[in-house]
């Protein structure tokens, strides 16, 4: 595996049961778990950044991947759960009080139109603000 990382050849190399060594185009490498959810969505979950490791560290990564596979078989999506915990998922239900572009534009125009010197611009934009 270390020779692949040193060569910085982009791609995904399987290790075992869904555990992959992934090398990005930038040359960075990481361990990832590839799986499908019950709904059939393909997922790639980063587990660790790659560092030259000994057998014990590799066994720990394999054990973590095996534990995640058990969760997946039980119908869970560990990547979605991790993202929800870290706050990366923004629920659309929370967007109810968000202003629209039109609301923001109208507010901006109403506050700034008096400072615009060109009557043509002031008149054209005034119709939107009213």
Image: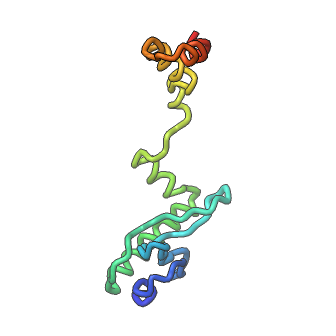
* Residue 78 image offset from top left, x and y in percent: 49, 57
Identify the image quadrant of the N terminus: bottom left
Query: Which sits in the foreground, 110 or 7?
Result: 110
Residue lying at the far right in this picture: please name it: 40
Q: Horizontal placement of 53 versus 43: left or right?
A: left
Residue name at image x 64 percent, y 58 percent: 41
98 up-or-down from 69: above or below:
above
* Residue 43 image offset from top left, x and y in percent: 57, 62
Q: How is the image coloured?
A: rainbow
* Residue 124 image offset from top left, x and y in percent: 60, 16
Q: Horizontal placement of 126 versus 62: left or right?
A: right
Residue lying at the far top in this picture: please name it: 130
7 up-or-down from 129: above or below:
below
Query: Which sits in the foreground, 12 or 81?
Result: 12
Q: Horizontal placement of 54 versus 4: left or right?
A: left
Tell how many labels.
0
40 up-or-down from 31: above or below:
above
Residue lying at the far bottom in this picture: please name it: 3
88 up-or-down from 17: above or below:
above
Residue name at image x 38 percent, y 76 percent: 50
Residue name at image x 41 percent, y 73 percent: 28
Q: Quadrant of residue 36?
A: bottom right
Residue name at image x 46 percent, y 17 percent: 116
* Residue 73 image offset from top left, x and y in percent: 58, 63
Query: Which sits in the foreground, 28 or 124?
Result: 124
Q: Quadrant of residue 112?
A: top left
Query: Which sits in the foreground, 47 or 109?
Result: 109
Identify the image quadrant of the C terminus: top right
């Amino acid at each position: 595996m270390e020779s692949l990382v040193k060569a910085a050849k982009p791609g995904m190399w399987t290790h075992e049961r869904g555990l992959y060594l992934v090398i990005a185009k930038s040359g960075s490498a990481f361990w990832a778990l590839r799986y499908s959810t019950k709904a059939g969505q393909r997922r790639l979950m980063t587990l660790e950044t790659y560092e030259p490791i000994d057998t014990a560290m590799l066994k720990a990564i394999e054990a973590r991947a095996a534990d995640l596979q058990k969760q997946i078989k039980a119908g869970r999506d560990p990547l979605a759960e991790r993202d929800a915990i870290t706050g990366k998922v923004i629920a659309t239900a929370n967007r109810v009080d968000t202003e629209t572009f039109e609301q923001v534009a109208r507010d901006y125009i109403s506050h700034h139109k008096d400072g615009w010197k060109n009557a043509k611009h002031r008149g054209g934009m005034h119709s939107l603000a009213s």
